[in-house]
Image: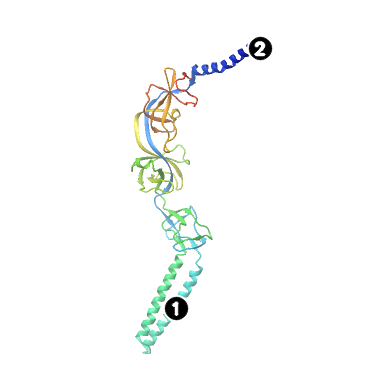
Amino acid sequence: MRRILTVIALVVALAAPVAWYGWRQYSPVAVETAQPRRGTAIDAVYATGVVEPVDSSRVGPVAAGRVERLLADVGDRVQRGQVLATLDDQQVQHKLEEARARLALAEREEARQRALIGRGAASEQALQRTESEAVQARAAMEAVRAQVADMRIVAPLDGVVISRDVDVGQSLAANSKAFVVAAPGRLRIAADVDERDIPRIRPGAAVAARAEGFPGRVFSSTVSRIYDSADSGTRTFRIEALLGADAPLRPGMTVDVNIVLSERAEALLVPATSIVRGPPRGGRPGAAAVWVVRDGRLRRIPVEAGATGPQWVEILGGLDQGDQVVAMPPQSLAEGRRARAAR
């Protein structure tokens, strides 16, 4: 009797998962569906960019030296020729004093020789020699004066200081960047585009930019310039787009940029959440597919995806407008399983 009970218990234990599997396999799964719709598909390339002035200049010291004083900072309005910073010029000031002393001595000797010539007590050759020495002394002093001037960093144009890369006491190399001065007015967007996307972009392509500081607002422009060479580190190409005079953006702001490649009216669109992808290939997204409900059962349909946006994806092939697409397919879906629309 005990053996019979054991067998019955074993049969019941084995039957339970079989019954659960059969119920799971043949009972309809509830899925949220959406019907593809017709609308405008915009094929665009996304990039990140920064707002910068069209007319700007990087300025630094002509000669190497240590920063002694800072006379301008970011945000200051400056005029062309205005001193932005000075370098330690103690050594060149000593050289200037020596050059002045040599010039004074040469000029006194030149004057003395002229006086002697007037009295007939000196030769023309002696006068010419002293005149030549005076000319050389003047040239030497002017050269040292130029060195003194090189100890100042001056604004190259009228504008606003938008960048300062130096501090007091810092040693600078000759021709290194210390400040960036931008002329007020014209602005542009400079964006970095992936090397895989740059062949599709042409001058004049429409640009739509958004900045966090201006939520809900779109700034429109067109591509005005495409650089021929890529950045060796990031393998991206720089593109530029001029902004209108009324744009409230400021230099240095970051923007999200969409470069429009094409627009297609009456395109077949499905929710972006309905697209499932295979494994990535060569850095690109994997093959696209959607789950549909046909004749009450689930089917995984390969599709050709076109323009992709945050809410809708264009379908170029593989899907009919009358199909019922699973809007947010879970990973547990199985081919051929019965399904019903969730309420």
Horizontal side of 296 relative to 204 (left or right) equals right
Kindly check if marks 1 and 2 are in contact, taking CB atoms under 8 A apart as contact. Answer: no
- Display coloring: rainbow
Task: Give the residue type at disc 2.
Answer: Arg
Identify the residue position indicated by label 2 in the image. Answer: 2
Whole-percent x, y for residue 17 in the image: 56, 18
In the displayed orientation, state which residue is furthest to the right. 2
Task: Give the residue type at disc 1.
Answer: Ala
Identify the residue position indicated by label 1 in the image. Answer: 104
Depth check: 131 or 26 in front? 26
Q: Residue at x 35, y 46 (%)?
A: 225
- Asked if 303 appears above or below 188 in the picture, the reply is above
Question: Of circles 1 and 2, which is in front?
Answer: 2
Local crowd at mark 2 within 10 Å, few (<14), some, or many (≥20)? Answer: few
- Asked if 26 appears above or below 149 in the picture, the reply is above
Depth check: 97 or 172 in front? 172
Residue 343 seen anywhere in this rendered image of the structure: no
Q: Quadrant of residue 308?
A: top left
- Asked if 94 appears above or below 315 in the picture, the reply is below
Depth check: 243 or 58 in front? 58
Whole-percent x, y for residue 148 in the image: 46, 67
Q: What's the mark number on residue 49?
A: none
Whole-percent x, y for residue 274 in the image: 44, 27
Q: Residue at x 51, y 68 (%)?
A: 90
Q: Secondary structure at mark 1?
A: helix
Whole-percent x, y for residue 244 in the image: 38, 44
Q: Residue at x 44, y 78 (%)?
A: 104
Q: Residue at x 37, y 34 (%)?
A: 42
Circle nearer the N terminus (1, 2): 2
Quadrant containing the N terminus in the rendered view: top right
In space, the residues marked 1 and 2 are separated at their CA atoms by 130 Å
